[in-house]
Amino acid sequence: MIGALFPLAKPVLHALDPETAHHLTIRGLSLMPVPAAPKDDERLAVDAFGRGFPNPVGLAAGFDKQCEVPDQLLSLGFGFVELGGVVPKPQAGNPRPRLFRLTQDEAVINRFGLNSDGLDAARRRLSRRRDRPGIVGVNIGANKDSADRIADYVACVRGLCGLTDFLTINVSSPNTPGLRDLQGEAFLDDLLARCIDARELADEGRRRTTILLKIAPDISLETLDAIVATALKRGIDGLTVSNTTVARPDALKEKALAGETGGLSGRPLFRPSTRLLAQAFQRVERRIPLIGVGGVDSAETAWAKIRAGASLIQLYSAMIYKGPGLIGEIKRGLLEKLQAEKMSLPQATGRDAPDIAEGRF
Ligand SMILES: Cc1cc2nc3c(=O)[nH]c(=O)nc-3n(C[C@H](O)[C@H](O)[C@H](O)COP(=O)(O)O)c2cc1C
């Protein structure tokens, strides 16, 4: 139903300031009754992290930052939903405006700076849905003014284990000064070790909470080598590739908006993030699953992520331009691809990684 309403709502939403439009969307979803999620074709099911995902198409972090509407989002047909980013103490983020639509590029620039109602609010909201079906995770970060950033991640792990299926350690948001430095080897090793230890304690006697690491697209292959080695050494369950980019491709049409500070997402992020995904796949060698995110806006781009090495995919920016009907479109398109190529999703995963890693796609 929401999918059918989007073509009517889009001109109104796009006439508004993007952040106001987003608040209205969340409000609209919060008022919606929560129908059961549509039943997916069994060929779309994915087993990853010891969990059964009904389909591989997930919602990326940043859409439902305050953990308000996970079940409404699942009911749109997503196979899983990532909420947040959540940080321990409430923080306002950067001043507005901080969200920009680059319409001609089907892209977005944001510099929210992890605006968050904080960990207690996230815990309260997630407690209310504790026994509901559907795979829900939370993206976690550090407060801007934190004196001990690693302690912030640990606090989020402690506070959210048991309330969520997975946690994503976000060291890749470009909008909190210094956050990306946590991708450096020594810091990352300490961060991941302490998060994994915190999970072991917090999960005791409960089903294990999956811990993922989300990386930036703007890294060298040497940094990628180190991140993969550290993640594997510390027992991280999977990598999410990637967050938004600070790069500004020359081809961007919206020249004035392209000058805004922040992370760029959507269509222009597709190629760099998919190439990095394939490069990560080559290094991980199927030891842990990868989640491919960045510029997914069609069945073709979703299929390319899978061929690059993604077991699961996520999207955000394309929802702004195409609305929730896109989720069903991608799922139908993926089924057609599987049928045409006579293969299963696991067989397709990483099939073209060598070519894509070299930029041949
Ligand atoms: C407005 C906005 C807010 C975001 N907030 C977060 C966040 O809090 N944590 C995070 O890890 N990624 C965040 N992201 C990044 C997305 O999760 C995703 O990695 C990125 O947008 C690329 O996917 P897309 O091209 O499909 O949008 C945000 C993206 C946007 C557009």
Image: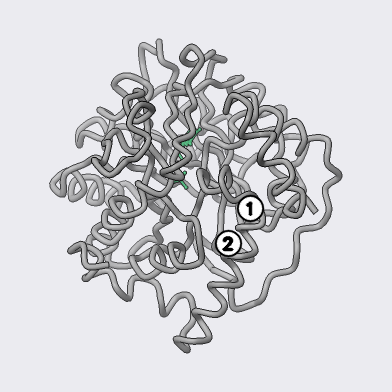
Give the amino acid at mark 1: Ile
Q: Are marks 2 and 1 in contact (CB under 8 Å)?
A: yes
130, 200: nearer the viewer: 130
295 lies above or below 247: below
Looking at the image, residue 261 lies above or below residue 146: below
Dot 1 lies on which element? strand
* Residue 49 place in picture, x, y as percent: 50, 59
Q: Earlier in the sequence, mark 2 or mark 1?
A: 2
Q: Residue at x 29, y 30 (%)?
A: 180
For disc 1, the neighbor class at 10 Å (few under 14, some 14 to 19, many from 20) is many
Q: Is residue 95 left or right of residue 229?
A: right
Along the viewing direction, whichever of 223 and 24 lies nearer the viewer:
24
The image shows residue 243 at horizontal and vertical percentages of 38, 41
Q: Disc 2 or disc 1, which is closer to the eye?
A: 1
Q: Quadrant of the C terminus?
A: bottom left
Q: Which residue is mark 2?
A: 51
Q: Is 122 situated above or below 343? A: above
On screen, residue 330 versus residue 281, left or right, reads right
